[in-house]
Image (tube, helix red, strand yellow):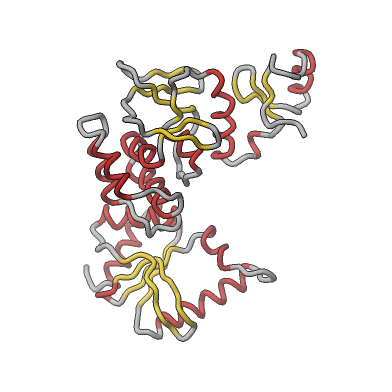
Amino acid sequence: MEPELIRRGGPASPTDNDMRRRRRTHDVHRIACGVYTPLDPDGLDPLRRHRLAVDAMLPRLSPDAVVSHQSAAVVHGLTLWRTDLSRVHVTRERDGGGRRRAGLRVHPGDLRGRTTRVDGIVVTTLERTVVDLARELPFEQALVAADAALSTAGARRAELERACLEVTGCYGAPAARRVTEYASEGSESVGESRSRVVFAKFGVPLPIQQAELVTAEGRVRVDFLWRGHGVVGEFDGKVKYGRFVRPGEDAGDAVFREKRREDAIRDLGLRVVRWTWDDLDAPADLVARIMRTLGRR
């Protein structure tokens, strides 16, 4: 089986003539200078494509460079949303400002020993990665990564808080503190994280996440519960809906079963507000619906 990365001049690498011919016929695609892949980058999701870029860049990095920021998030397997992945990011413990060159951004910084190895790659720890993202990215993008780190990737809140304290006085420290304080183990999808951003921005009371209810259909978990108001909030994202499809079913079966589930929730005397990706992109109407249902205007 051909390797995913082919380095020009490497062991058993094709000749320059062979490589030029294969590029003309689109059998290989350039990932970085002197590095090619038989995979079609346009057919890969952005995270997979960026991981290839990281692997391609590794031999060209300084020995003290640590993969960090977006690139560390990809290596750790974190969920990212609308995050720029056009460059590989590394951190070096040196004085001076950051540097950029083709396909690479070098950050200066004191990592305080917060490094680890993932798949043989030296990267910032999960918690330091979240803090670095929070210092650089818009709040919404950073929160998606932070929630994913806590809910699915095994990050520990106490370690996240310590990593945040270690950058006190550094660029972006207040932003990192805000993300750390607001991050939640209860968000199971990008949509749920983004919903919480809407709540914070527009003053919607914070709900309980992943609350369990006992209904006539059995025990169910809901995305959001405003218990004191008797209101349930559900984010309808295609990714999460797909989890309801059972073997031998189609999406219509899942939707019908979800309707029965919602009816059972309403039978408990609870009101249900649902929303979609489009609502999160233009949330004014969503906020009005939630506040109206909560009995607040």
Q: Name the residue at 33% across, 70% down.
A: 225
205 shown above or below 65: below
**Which of 154 and 251 lies nearest the eye of the viewer?**
154
Asked whether, in this view, residue 18 is left or right of residue 265, the answer is right
The quarter of the displayed image where residue 255 is located: bottom right
Residue 212, percent from left and from top: 39, 74
Asked whether, in this view, residue 14 is left or right of residue 7, the answer is right
219 shown above or below 116: below
The quarter of the displayed image where residue 285 is located: bottom left
Q: Name the residue at 67% across, 24% down.
A: 36
Task: Check the picture and name the quadrant holding the C terminus.
Answer: bottom left
Residue 123, percent from left and from top: 45, 32
223 shown above or below 159: below
Task: Check the picture and name the quadrant holding the N terminus.
Answer: top right
**Which of 94 and 213 lies nearest the eye of the viewer?**
94
Q: Name the residue at 27% across, 45% down.
A: 161
